[in-house]
Image (tube, helix red, strand yellow):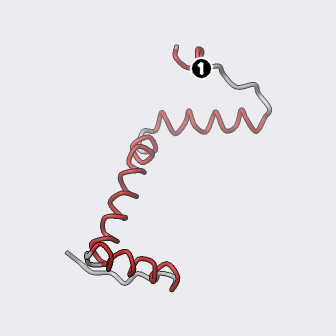
């Protein structure tokens, strides 16, 4: 595993240190867990953005909103 330097504001670092002390865990393990959670939460978005058809659909929808076109109902989206 490679290492990286991470700058964390002092207030947040101090809170993480308190948590790691209370939980008797290494700070690096807590930060690694937080990164894993962040990646997991964003996987679906990355999957969608890797599909050109979905990207085009998203662009069209954003343009329609910008142009003031009325959106679609949930029933219309299900079709």
Q: Nearer the viewer, residue 10 or 25?
A: 25
Residue 12 relative to residue 3: left or right: right
Q: Which residue sits at x=45%, y=45%?
A: 45
Quadrant in which residue 35 is drawn = bottom left
Residue 43 relative to residue 10: left or right: left
Quadrant in which residue 28 is drawn = bottom left
Element type at mark 1 = helix
Quarter of the image that includes the N terminus: bottom left
Q: Which residue sits at x=40%, y=58%?
A: 38
Q: Which residue sits at x=56%, y=20%?
A: 77
Where 12 falls versus 76 (above or below)? below
Q: Nearer the viewer, residue 44 or 63?
A: 44
Where does the image place residue 56, in percent across and percent down from the top left? Answer: 55, 36
Where 52 falls versus 30 (above or below)? above
Residue at the limit of the structure toward the left, as seen here: 1
Where does the image place residue 62, in percent across and percent down from the top left? Answer: 66, 38
Label 1 belongs to which residue?
74
Where does the image place residue 16, in percent across and percent down from the top left? Answer: 41, 77
Total label count? 1
């Amino acid at each position: 595993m490679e290492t990286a330097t991470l700058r964390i504001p002092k207030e947040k670092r101090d809170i993480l240190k308190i948590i790691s002390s209370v939980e008797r865990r290494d700070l690096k393990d807590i930060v690694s867990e937080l990164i894993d959670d962040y990646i997991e939460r964003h996987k679906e978005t990355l999957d969608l953005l890797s599909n050109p058809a979905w990207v085009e659909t998203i662009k069209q929808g954003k343009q329609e909103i910008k142009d003031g076109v009325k959106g679609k109902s949930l029933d219309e989206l299900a079709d």
